[in-house]
Image (spheres, grey):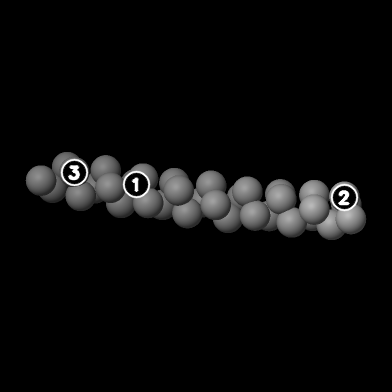
Amino acid sequence: MRLMLSWFKVMMVKGWMGHLISELVFIPYLRAMI
């Protein structure tokens, strides 16, 4: 149970970081296209 919670936390942080990075890359890319 404890292992699952820690794994879930890691996945949440990774997903959040990936989302942040994709936004930081995607927004300037969109601006360059327009």
Mark 3 nearby-residue class (10 Å; few <14, some 14–19, many ≥20): few
Q: How far apart, in angstroms, are the residues tagged by discs 3 and 1? A: 10 Å
In the picture of the structure, the residue carrying the numbered disc 3 is 4
Q: Are marks 2 and 1 in contact (CB under 8 Å)?
A: no
Percent position of residue 12, x then y: 37, 51
Q: Which mark is residue 24?
A: none
Mark 2 nearby-residue class (10 Å; few <14, some 14–19, many ≥20): few
Mark 1 residue type: Val
Residue in the picture at 44% in, 46% down: 14
Mark 2 residue type: Met
Mark 3 residue type: Met
In the picture of the structure, the residue carrying the numbered disc 1 is 10
Residue closest to the far left:
1
Tell me which label, 2 or 1, sits earlier in the chain: 1
Tell me which label, 3 or 1, sits earlier in the chain: 3
Closer to the camera: disc 2 or disc 1?
Answer: 2
Q: Is residue 34 left or right of residue 27?
A: right
Residue in the picture at 53% in, 47% down: 18
The count of marks equals 3
Percent position of residue 19, x then y: 55, 52
Closer to the camera: disc 2 or disc 3?
Answer: 2
Q: How far apart, in angstroms, are the residues tagged by discs 2 and 1? A: 34 Å
In the picture of the structure, the residue carrying the numbered disc 2 is 33
Residue in the picture at 87% in, 50% down: 33
Could you say whether the residue bearing mark 3 is in a helix, strand or loop? helix
